[in-house]
Amino acid sequence: MQTEERITTELVRGFVMAAHGDFEKVQELLSEHPSLLHASYNWGGADWESALGAAAHVGRRDIALYLLEKGARMDIFAAAMLGELAIVQAILVVQPEALRASGPHGIPLLQHARMGGEAAHRVFEYVTALT
């Protein structure tokens, strides 16, 4: 029987904070505490954020790809920032209301695509056309 690792709220907060820009810290913390991969932190007011969500809204492609490689669950916001047009389109076909969904800190889908830069330009154009 596998035992579950216990992680503290402060550890989750530190991991999510690191995912906003400290790649080495993300690698270090995830290596020490693999359970952090799927953890989310509540900043208050139901503003939940995962490490992938943090990397996505600040345009940290390197951190997002690393987390996905480790098994993080792709979402529409990360897909938009990474320029994954087919994923964004597929989600919006079955869940059109996702176009108006808010990501961490209330940041909209279009802003996530903007943060992806040139790699996400096609997603940005697609989402812009829908809004």
Image: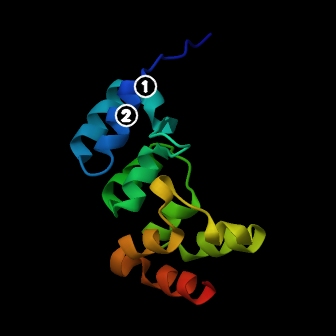
Q: Amino acid at mark 1?
A: Thr
**Can you tell which mark lies on residue 57?**
none
Q: Are marks 1 and 2 in contact (CB under 8 Å)?
A: yes
Q: Amino acid at mark 2?
A: Arg
Query: Residue 25: percent from the left, percent from the top?
Result: 24, 38
81, above or below 50, in the image = below
Query: Residue 107: percent from the left, percent from the top?
Result: 47, 63
Q: Mark 1 packing: few (<14 Cα in 10 Å), some, or many (20+)?
A: few
Q: Quadrant of the N terminus?
A: top right
39, above or below 103, in the image = above
Secondary structure of the residue carrying numbered label 2: helix
Secondary structure of the residue carrying numbered label 1: helix
Query: Residue 37: percent from the left, percent from the top?
Result: 46, 37
The residue drawn where x is 37% and y is 34% is 13
Left or right, 20 with respect to 4, comes to left
Count numbered badges in the picture.
2
Q: Nearer the viewer, residue 113 or 67?
A: 113
The residue drawn where x is 50% and y is 87% is 125
Quarter location, residue 96: bottom right
Left or right, 60 with respect to 85, comes to left
The residue drawn where x is 25% and y is 47% is 23
6, above or below 61, in the image = above
Left or right, 75 with respect to 52, comes to right
Q: Which residue is mark 1?
A: 9
Q: Mark 2 packing: few (<14 Cα in 10 Å), some, or many (20+)?
A: many
Q: Which residue is mark 2?
A: 13
Left or right, 118 with respect to 39, comes to left
Q: CA distance from mark 1 to mark 2?
A: 6 Å
- The scheme the figure's colours follow is rainbow
The residue drawn where x is 48% and y is 81% is 124
